[in-house]
Amino acid sequence: MTWDGKERRARKRFGIKGCTVQYKSAELFGLFSALSPRYLVLNICQGGLHFISREEIPIGKKLLLFINAPLLDDNLITVKSRTLWTRKSKEHNAYRTGIVFMGLSQQSKNRLKLILDNALLDKIDLSTRVYLKEVEKL
């Protein structure tokens, strides 16, 4: 499905400066795998997030996410999720990835609410090239 310009999102998205995500497979043997590199979160809401990855993550793939933001003092939000959509960047060897949360513990909900309530940015507009340069700095 191609985007027709019509907004279908039920929840407001926020850009949180310095918010990062790492992931690993939440499937049977994936829990023993190494974490992905850290990626900057482009936007986040109560139901999911969007970031750019150097690897393609198949749609429907179950992931365990580790979300960090400056207000969390290195206390990560850990959440089970799955890939909702993925799109290859036209300019670079990277993939825009949309993630939906499959269940948040009460503690994770509280931490997520803390970072969303203190969000300063409604949107982070970065080109894929700028984004990938920023990721290399992490």
Image: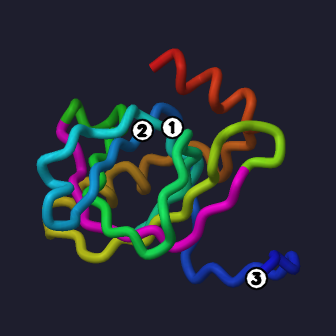
Badge nearest the viewer, 2 or 3: 3
Residue 125: where, in percent of width, then height?
74, 43
Tell me, for residue 124, which label it has, or none: none
Q: Amino acid at mark 3?
A: Met
The residue range painted magenta reads 75-88
Tell me, for residue 40, which label it has, or none: 1
Q: Residue at x 63, y 53 (%)?
A: 96
Q: Residue at x 51, y 15 (%)?
A: 137
Compare residues 53 and 7 and report the one nearer the observer: 53
Q: Residue at x 32, y 52 (%)?
A: 114
Tell me, for residue 1, which label it has, or none: 3
Q: Of label 2 and label 3, which has the lower sequence position? A: 3
**Residue 53, image quadrant:** top right
Check residue 65 for magenta coloring: no
Badge nearest the viewer, 3 or 1: 3
Q: Identify the residue position indicated by label 2 in the image.
A: 20
Q: Amino acid at mark 1?
A: Leu
Residue 120: where, in percent of width, then height?
56, 43
Estimate how packed mark 3 is, as few (under 14), some (14 to 19) or many (20 or more) residues with alpha carbons within 10 Å: few
Task: Give the quadrant of the C terminus.
Answer: top left
In the displayed structure, would residue 47 be above or below residue 72? Answer: below
Compare residues 42 and 13 and report the one nearer the observer: 42
Residue 121: where, in percent of width, then height?
61, 45
Q: Residue at x 34, y 42 (%)?
A: 22
Tell me, yes or no, whether the two marked residues, 1 and 2, touch with CB atoms within 8 Å.
yes
Q: Of label 1 and label 2, which has the lower sequence position? A: 2
Q: Of label 3 and label 1, which has the lower sequence position? A: 3
Indicate left or right for 100 with 126 as reference.
left
Q: Secondary structure at mark 3?
A: loop
What is the number of callouts on the image? Answer: 3
